[in-house]
Image: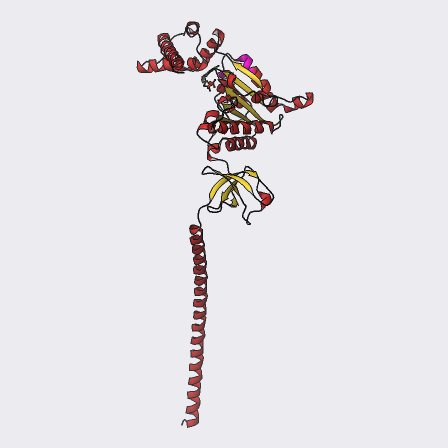
Amino acid sequence: MTTIKDKKKKEEIKDGEYLITYTRHLEKRLRNLETEKQLLDAERLRLEQELHSLRNEIDRLREPPLVTATIIDILDEKGRAIVKSSTGPSFVVNTSRNVKNEKISSGMRVALNQRTFAIMEILPTKLDPFVKGMEVIDSIPDISYADVGGLEEQLLEVRETVELPLKKPELFKRIGIDPPKGVLLYGAPGTGKTLLAKAVAHETEATFIRIIGSELVQKFIGEGARLVREIFNLAKQKAPTILFIDELDAIGSQRLKVATSGDREVQRTLMQLLSELDGFEERGDVKIIGATNRVDILDPALMRPGRFDRMIEFPIPNEKAREAIFKIHIRNLRVQEKILIKKLVKLTEGATGADIKAICTEAGMFAIRKDADSITQKDFFEAVDKVLKKTKNQFLNSKLYS
Ligand code: ATP
């Protein structure tokens, strides 16, 4: 007989069990909710971060664009400076508080506020894309001294003044003389100036940088001086370097008294070139080779000691030189019979190395047109006729229209 007491006890036990189960259930629920809360907290944090970065992005996009400029001169310690903006004009401007005054110096690229023109930022001194894309050849595998014909004296002189100081600077140190910093190659177009410079770069395993004077002043108006500076920096970075400045007359012609803005631009570029030439060591491993067809109009300042102080003439090749050049260019061609080079030499009085190369290419073209396997003597004669007639006409035209 179960007493009422027992019944009550049983119920109490049941209730207790229920309570335990329920508590466990609640605990589990709580744990779940806590996990869920943690997940939601993490999600909130992520969204907050995203919001923050989107806000930043909006702020950044709303900022007015800055104007790039180059510092020309610093006027005082308070940060006043003359800048030349990329849009053209020059301004006297202040420097924003965010930029430390002592950090700015002339020649730096900076960003200006569009309204106040204050210097807001110093831009990284990246190389100009033009400078980067310039003809920089680390090694020139296919041009050696053997590819240069009939320029023995010139070769010797360039080797002494450019190759020797690069390869054996100690020789100059021992004797106590300073090798020339720059040599100037002058002579008619196509006489092998570039070819020789490339050959020296190859033989000395130097970086070869070629810049063309006329491009500096025509394509990059207002930028010539800056580019010259950057090119010299690049040359120093990549040393040993041979810096070849072709058409030097385009930047280095005599300074005239009547100066148009174009002349002034050329003069600024020249002044920069002169100061770069003066600014580095003779015994360093950057050598400058200048080339020009118009040595007569060059500014004498360029030829002062410590600048282009060695001048090497590249003459129109004589018979012996023409023979050597023909041999060089014919050596890789497929010719049918033994080509009478001496006859070609006789026919090409006054031709330059570039003409001779053109004759060989043209002879090859004649053979191709005939669908022949190799080039004949007749092809060469026809090519001489064609190339020299063409150059003669060019010469006549230039005389008529100059
Ligand atoms: P420019 O004043 O027009 O720059 P350049 O004197 O620098 O002319 P190069 O560019 O060196 O002339 O010559 C053009 C081409 O003519 C050379 O790539 C080469 O193939 C040929 N050439 C000129 N001179 C010689 C030479 N002495 N020996 C062999 N090839 C030559």
Answer whether residue 158 is visible to the viewer in this image: yes
Q: Nearer the viewer, residue 396 or 376?
A: 396
Q: Is residue 11 above or below residue 166?
A: below
Outermost residue to the front: 258
Image coordinates for residue 199, horizontal then vertical, percent: 51, 20
Bounds of the magenta segment: 147-155
Image coordinates for residue 198, horizontal then vertical, percent: 50, 22
Residue at point 44%, 86% (across, down): 13
Q: How many marks?
A: 0
In the picture, the quarter occupied by the N terminus is bottom left
Outermost residue to the left: 370
Q: Quadrant of residue 236?
A: top right
Q: Is residue 14 left or right of residue 109?
A: left
Image coordinates for residue 34, horizontal then vertical, percent: 45, 69
In the picture, the quarter occupied by the C terminus is top left
Residue at point 52%, 20% (across, down): 298
- Residue 148 is a magenta residue: yes
Image coordinates for residue 69, horizontal then vertical, percent: 49, 40
Q: How is the image coloured?
A: secondary structure
- Residue 389 is a magenta residue: no
Q: Is residue 123 above or below residue 260?
A: below
Q: Nearer the viewer, residue 320 or 121?
A: 121
Answer whether residue 3 is visible to the viewer in this image: no
Residue at point 43%, 52% (across, down): 57
